[in-house]
Amino acid sequence: YDDGAKVRIVGVRRTSRRAVDPAVKSGNYLNNILALAEAREEGAYEALMCDSAGWIAEGSSSNLFVVEGGVLMTPALSIGLLAGITRQRLMELAGSLGISVEESRLTREDVLKADEAFLTSSIRGVLPICSIDDVPLGGGAPGPTASQCRMCPRGPQRSIPSGAASAHLEEPRSDGTAARLDEPRSDGTAARLLEPRTTGTAARPLEPRTTGTGARPLEPRTTGTAPPPPD
């Protein structure tokens, strides 16, 4: 939060609204996982996905805001993206801060020439971006608008542990509940995408076995019983 996050515009396209509508919060995260994996391979913290026409849509688990000429802009919902709770809350609060907000159609060139940019999500809150595709924004440091907005939705956000990567989509927290795609582990260690289970429970589609080989959808548990088919 103090230094900003590196972001990469990836080749993985956001799912078409005619297929699995991104506005629906479903259990289908394959598109998001592939995008994040590509960004991580390039050394970035988060991915930005475009729609089929090349318009910037959203992150793998976040919404995008950019600031240009004092105007706060975010991709329009009509492009095909999730209407995040923090995104909506921030748009409502921006007016009270005297900040103009626009839902826009943004290209890669638009975001690269922005004065500053940041991500929003329920877990991250407001996370400043220091660079996109290795191009520094605002001198490569968090901008004043991001710093101002950080104080609004939930107060100042905690720092992400150094070197922490995203936790597996289904990785349990210490209290037994499921961690989200972008939630860092409490001990600060890096969790791998598609991290294998070691409990002998059913392997999820695309989840590696503990032997390192790829698990197939509906693979039987080690107890011999088969997991139920998907709804």
Image (tube, rainbow, N blue to C red):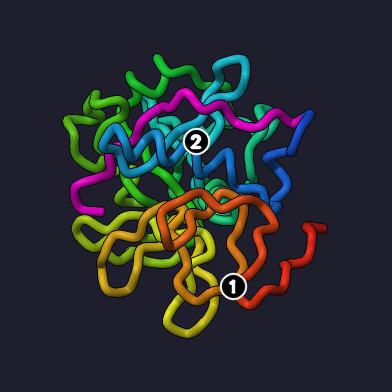
Circle 1 crowding by C-alpha within 10 Å: few under 14, some 14–19, many from 20? few
The residue sitting at the front extreme is 224
Query: Residue 152: x, y in percent?
Result: 43, 60
Magenta segment includes 2: yes
Dominant secondary structure (helix, strand or loop) of the stretch shown in magenta: loop
* Res 100 label: 2
Residue annotated with mark 1: 222
Query: Residue 132: x, y in percent?
Result: 31, 29
Nearer to me, 65 or 205:
205
Query: Residue 47: x, y in percent?
Result: 42, 37
Q: Is residue 204 left or right of residue 180?
A: right
Instruction: Name the residue rendered at 37%, 35% in the picture.
Output: 39
Name the N-terminal-most of marks 2 and 1.
2
Q: Quadrant of residue 20?
A: top right
Nearer to me, 27 or 210:
210
Q: Quadrant of residue 53?
A: top right
Secondary structure beneath disc 2?
A: strand
Q: CA distance from mark 2 to mark 1?
A: 56 Å
Q: Is residue 181 above or below residue 74?
A: below
Disc 1 marks a residue whose amino acid type is: Thr
Circle 2 crowding by C-alpha within 10 Å: few under 14, some 14–19, many from 20? some
Q: Quadrant of the N terminus?
A: bottom left
Q: Which residues are magenta?
A: 1-17
Query: Can you see residue 124?
Result: no
Query: Residue 19: x, y in percent?
Result: 76, 32
Q: Is residue 18 left or right of residue 184?
A: right
Disc 2 marks a residue whose amino acid type is: Ser
Secondary structure beneath disc 1?
A: loop
Q: Is residue 209 above or below residue 197?
A: above
Q: Is residue 63 above or below residue 103?
A: below
